[in-house]
Every structure is written in C-alpha cells, then in structure tokens.
Amino acid sequence: MNRLLHKIISPLPGLVRWYLSKPRNYHFGQLRLVIQPGVFHPGLFFSSTFLTEYIQTLPLQGKCVVEVGCGAGLLALTAAHQGAQVIALDISPQAVANTRLNANQNNLTIQVVQSDLFHALSPAGADWIFINPPYYPKTPVTDQDHAWYCGENHLYFRRLFQQLQDTHAQIIMVLSDVCDLASINQISHEAGFELKEIQRKRVWADGYNYLYRIIRTESGLTATSTHNAGRFYSS
C-alpha cells in the first residue's frame, strides 16, 4: 500500500472507506473502468499502473495470458486490448463481476473465472502470467481482505509458487518496499524459483516498486513435471 495512503487511512479510516464505498470511474489510456465498492482500486496504487505500463510494451497478440487476482480488470483488459487471449482470475465474486462489467464496457472479450489462485484452472498452457499480489501477512477474513492480506507466514506465496510448478509461462510479478521482500524471496527459492528484478521505480512516499520475472532455478527445472503442458483447462 502507498505509505502516504497508509498514513491517511490510519487516522481517517472513515474518509477513505467512504470514497471506496461508492462506484468510481477510472480511466487508463483508452480503457474506461468503473471500480465497484469492495474491489481493489488500481488508480490509488502505483504497483497497478507500473505493471500495466510494462504489459503495454509486450508483444501479446495471440498469446494466452492469465491475470491472477484481477480486481477490476485493468491488467487483463490491457492485455486483451493488445490482442491477447485473456483469462482473469479472482477469489472475490465482486471482483469477478466488476471485471466482466469493465470488459463489456470496453467491448473486449475475456474469460473471467472465480478461483482461489489456480484452483479452478491449470496454468499449464499460459504464455504469460501477471500477478499483483496481496502481501500483508495477516489472515484474510472477508472477500475484500484477499486483495490485501497474504495470510500468516505468507501462505499466499507458498501456495502460489507451488501451483506455478506446472507452467512454462513467462511470469511477471510486482512488489514494493512495503512488503517483506526477504521472506517472499526465501519462499520462492524453497519452491525452486528465483525472483529476477527487471525494473524498479521509486515513488514519492512509497519507496521502490519492483517488477520481477519469476524464473526456475536448476533445482526447480529438475523437479518440474511436464505431463500437463497443454492449453488451459478447467478442473
């Protein structure tokens, strides 16, 4: 979370909650989004626009793209606008509905699936996977909490890296100085992955934001099974 916003939220939670309690219009490039109450607002957090700007530089025409934790759908719709075949995943039914709304509003065709990480869909056939994860080490209770909290001991990341074992996709994840980078790096190494920094940007009052490519270590390559390296399928 933006450090300045965190300072604002702490003494004035009512004001921020009021702002986020109503539908808000948000524009990014040619995309026109409505952010529904209870759904992560990409315009308030630099991590979202940082990753989106990177996605805009990629040759995604005809590629299979999956976004994990789509929120209102900014990343997924950006990829679809570039000609990708997109599947957007989110555990929150509000986020799923919001992404579908925004896809229709922008005349873009994507598949939106309610899923806890890859529970409903194998990542095996993805060409690209984009992740703007929750990273506060607290157990989520409500659907909204899943946008912020990764569970005690960073359970989200432990499950994420385990489920990424069956894909050969190029995986991009955004993190910031606010999260426990050392712990997340350690978890990735334990699962046979490495976080390779590809970009960083310093944001006023928010420290650095980082884009990482998630790549396999030698041990991860040795342990990888290729038995289901086909296209996406529903489980």
Image (tube, rainbow, N blue to C red):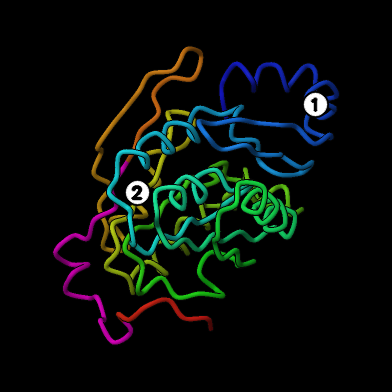
Q: Residue 109, located in which quarter of the rendered image?
A: bottom right
Q: Within 10 angstroms of label 1, few (less than 14), some, or many (20 or more) residues?
A: few
* Residue 146 on image: x %, y %: 65, 51
Query: Magenta span covers which residues?
Result: 212-228
Q: Residue 215: say if magenta.
A: yes
How many residues crowd around disc 2 within 10 Å: few (fewer than 14), some, or many (20 or more)? many
Residue at 75% in and 32% down: 24
Residue drawn where x is 41% and y is 38% of the image: 51
Residue 235 lies, in percent from the top left, at: 53, 83
Q: Give, as a three-letter code, the residue at label 2.
A: Ile
Which residue is painted at 37% across and 39% down in the image?
Answer: 56
Lateral position of residue 124 relative to residue 36, left or right: left
Q: Nearer the viewer, residue 14 or 182?
A: 14
Q: In this view, does 53 lie above or below 159?
A: above
Q: Which residue lies furthest to the left in this view?
A: 218
Residue 19 image label: 1
Q: In this view, does 95 lie above or below 229?
A: above
Q: Which mark, residue 172?
A: 2
Of labels 2 and 1, earlier in sequence is 1
56 relative position to 95: left or right: left
Taking 222 as reference, is 118 left or right? right
Quadrant for the N terminus, please: top right
The amino acid at mark 1 is Tyr
